[in-house]
Image (cartoon, grey):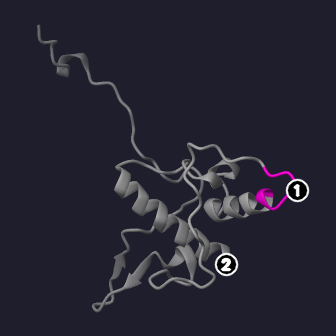
């Protein structure tokens, strides 16, 4: 399994866990202690670092509050594209591209804006209810 395929697999599991728990699960797995979020495939590389630390003669204990790592299959599970993150969209019958809901699109650093915080002008502020 390539790093891109493992990243897709771990992203899908993280997405499903986030939906189940009602919050972002990024940073809650055992591998997240070794994550560098600016890397191309951060979850997959962090998972490999975790495995190498666990295989060392003196492995670090994993805190109980972290979620254990999922089983990583040797073969690519059905439904995960072999091309990695570039396969986040698949062609439909009419030739358009359909967004896959479990795929997290990764962009260049600083290329995603989640929200912009602005102050409301004082005239638009609602008065406090007493």
Which element type, helix, strand or loop, lies under badge 1? loop
Sequence-earlier tag: 2 or 1: 2
Single out the residue that lies furthest toward the left.
Answer: 130
Report the magenta residues as a range: 53-59
Q: Which mark identifies residue 5?
A: none
Q: Which residue is mark 2?
A: 2
The furthest residue to the bottom: 93
SS at mark 2?
Answer: loop
Residue 9 percent location from the top left of the image: 53, 72
Would you name the residue on which mark 1 appears?
Answer: 57
Q: Which is more toward the observer, 92 or 45?
A: 45
Which image quadrant: the C terminus? top left
Identify the image quadrant of the N terminus.
bottom right
The percent position of residue 100, horizontal first and vertical second, equals 38, 74
Taking the spot 64% from the left edge, 43% from the top edge, the residue there is 63
Closer to us: 64 or 99: 64
Q: Residue at x 72, y 58 (%)?
A: 50
Residue 101: image location, x then y, percent: 36, 69
The quadrant in which residue 92 appears is bottom left
Is 112 drawn above or below residue 117 in the view shown? below
Mark 2 against mark 1, which lies toward the viewer?
1
Furthest residue in direction top, as rendered: 130
* 80 drawn magenta: no
Q: Give the residue at x 40% y 63%.
A: 16
Q: Residue at x 54, y 66 (%)?
A: 10
Q: Residues within 10 Å of mark 2 (few under 14, many from 20)?
A: few
- Give the image quarter of residue 44: bottom right
């Amino acid at each position: 399994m390539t790093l891109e395929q493992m990243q897709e697999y771990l992203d899908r599991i993280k997405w499903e866990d986030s939906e189940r728990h009602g919050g972002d699960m990024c940073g809650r797995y055992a591998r997240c202690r070794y994550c560098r979020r600016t890397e191309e495939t951060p979850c997959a590389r962090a998972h490999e670092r975790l495995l190498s630390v666990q295989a060392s003669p003196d492995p670090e204990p994993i805190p109980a509050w972290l979620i254990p790592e999922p089983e990583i299959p040797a073969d690519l599970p059905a439904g995960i594209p072999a091309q990695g993150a570039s396969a986040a969209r698949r062609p439909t019958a009419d030739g358009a591209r359909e967004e896959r809901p479990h795929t997290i699109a990764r962009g260049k650093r600083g290329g995603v804006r989640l929200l912009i915080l602005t102050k409301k002008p004082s005239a638009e502020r609602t008065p406090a209810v007493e």
